[in-house]
Image: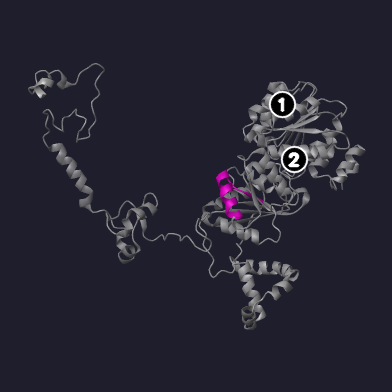
Amino acid sequence: MVSFTDFDLSPELMRAILELGYEKPSPIQAEAWPILLGEACDFLGLAATGTGKTAGFSVPMLECIDPVRREVQALILCPTRELAVQVCEQVQNLGKYLGVEALPIYGGASYAEQHRGLHQGIPVVVGTPGRIVDHIRRGTLNLDSLQLIILDEADEMISMGFKDELTAILDAVPEGQVNTWLFSATMHPEVRRVADAYLKQPKQVQVNRTEMVPTTIEQRFYVTHEANKPEVLRKLVDSVDDFYGLVFCQTKALVADLSMYLLDRGYRVDSLHGDKSQAAREQTMKAFRDRKVKLLICTDVAARGLDVKDVTHVINYSIPKELDSYVHRIGRTARCGKSGFAFSLIAPRQRALIAQIERLTKSKLKEGTIPTRKELGIKKISSYLKHFQESTGFDRAQLSLSDEWKELLATLSPEEIASRFLALQFAEIFADREPEVRGFPSTPTGETQQRPKSRGVVPSRGILPLTKGPAFAPEAKAKAPMGERRIPESISSERPELEKAPTPKATREKPLREKAAREKAPRETGKGSKDVPYSKKRSDKGPRPDFKKGKKPPFAANRDSLPTAAKKPKKTKKQSG
């Protein structure tokens, strides 16, 4: 078994590693460190997410840094702000006894603070490509003394549209004196092209390429309709004793709706997406790391490199459009060899995606069973027993019981008394009927939005032209889906043949007969007629001839010969007076 003592690390760095709680090197660290701690070279490291790539390049980088020199010696590029902040903290924690500091540079933060840090000569700069390019163009980031550039999550930076910024940064570094290390979870063709263009004879390490996700992650999927996902999500969260995890959604609007839905029901939840300001995002992440928030609803902005300790669950509320993102999402759990769970909610029509995910991840997904209210009730009561036994202040409550309470309690058994209070405590679980949730209902708790019955809804083509009755009132038509016409239940049940009745032949041919009659009728051409061929108001609706510019219509040449009505003399003021 490989240990940290097998590598020639400085005592200061070894002390920081042990204080951070690392027990042994991960596979990518064990294979990469002998290369990176040796002679200077370009490097390409491929490993699954959550395998310790950050420490894999941070430790050998710190051994190469001279803390006495107050110049930028290493540049680390990350795809997102959160990952840049996280990598910067990791570098500072590992290099605190070496005297090496790191400066995070990313969009949304103040330029003034970043200018001050760069002016002081921080040896390690960690940033996002866009803001790094800004500082290079402004002349505030000097790369003359740069020795090492590291591309962390290179595939994600390219997929997020940072390829031009990456190439601009790589072109700006001094040629011949900088080594490039590229770390990635996947190897897309674009990543390969960047590596071939900028890495010179790189040494390469691949770890667990046959397994895209750690084997310690248990993957399950639950089949449910889209409108039932909020309630299914609540059941899955309630079924876990101490849920601490992430829920990934496809859009920012869905993140906001789902967060509000869970907040209204008492869950400790917060959201994370690209529209949040940097200060709000940092505050959210701090609350999540401190476990003040147990449930973080987020978009794929948190899918890359976000390292939070002891995340137990990752739930894919929406399957990502790019299945590669699935790997990075579920990689937020089961990190550093720990176990975790990854749940995915899919609609019945999305079953084919499961086979694609299995081929991509080279793993098997199990179909899970949605917990019932009875199972949740048993679990809730069992977990509540400890709080019941440790409760205090009940003696003062007993003194407050009135005679009515004492008379009522005398008629009830202890089991019935406890059951009544549990039903009040967990009203949603022990309700008479389980509510059918349709999306994010605006109705009060307990009311349901009934799903429209499929009977009585038929295509608009091929039905009798019914125009009377309550079902065809304006409000009823407004509720009917586009392209469908709703028939009253009484009609569809009494006369089911109406649903498939073809349009009568007379009804179909009537417009044709009227059109033929109009075409055969003689057309007037006199002045003032509504059927003048070139008039604006034409009944035949035929195509209007296109006249060349400057050429008059046929009737314009003979306009002077047409009879004109005698003009009436205008009245003057004297005549009118």
Q: Which mark is residue 86?
A: 2
Residue 121, given in percent of the width and then of the height, sits at 81, 26
Residue 255, given in percent of the width and then of the height, sits at 59, 47
Q: Nearer the viewer, residue 508 or 193?
A: 508
Q: Above or below — where is 137 with respect to 433? A: above
SS state under label 2: helix
Residue furthest out toward the bottom? 411
Q: Is residue 126 left or right of residue 360?
A: right
Q: Is residue 262 shown in magenta?
A: yes
Residue at 63% x, 82% y is 407
Q: Residues within 10 Å of mark 2 (few under 14, many from 20)?
A: many
Q: Is residue 479 left or right of residue 283?
A: left
Residue 86, given in percent of the width and then of the height, sits at 74, 40
The stretch of residues the image draws in magenta is 246-263
Q: In which quadrant of the rendered image does the C terminus lie?
A: top left
Q: Is residue 297 left or right of residue 124?
A: left
SS state under label 1: helix
Residue 358, given in percent of the width and then of the height, sits at 63, 50
Q: Above or below — where is 359 with respect to 491? A: above
Residue furthest out toward the front? 577
Q: Quadrant of residue 268?
A: bottom right
Alpha carbons under labels 2 and 1: distance apart: 26 Å
Q: Which mark is residue 198?
A: 1
Q: Is residue 36 visible from the viewing direction of this image?
A: no
Q: Is residue 512 shown in magenta?
A: no
Q: Above or below — where is 359 with respect to 447? A: above
Residue furthest out toward the right? 11
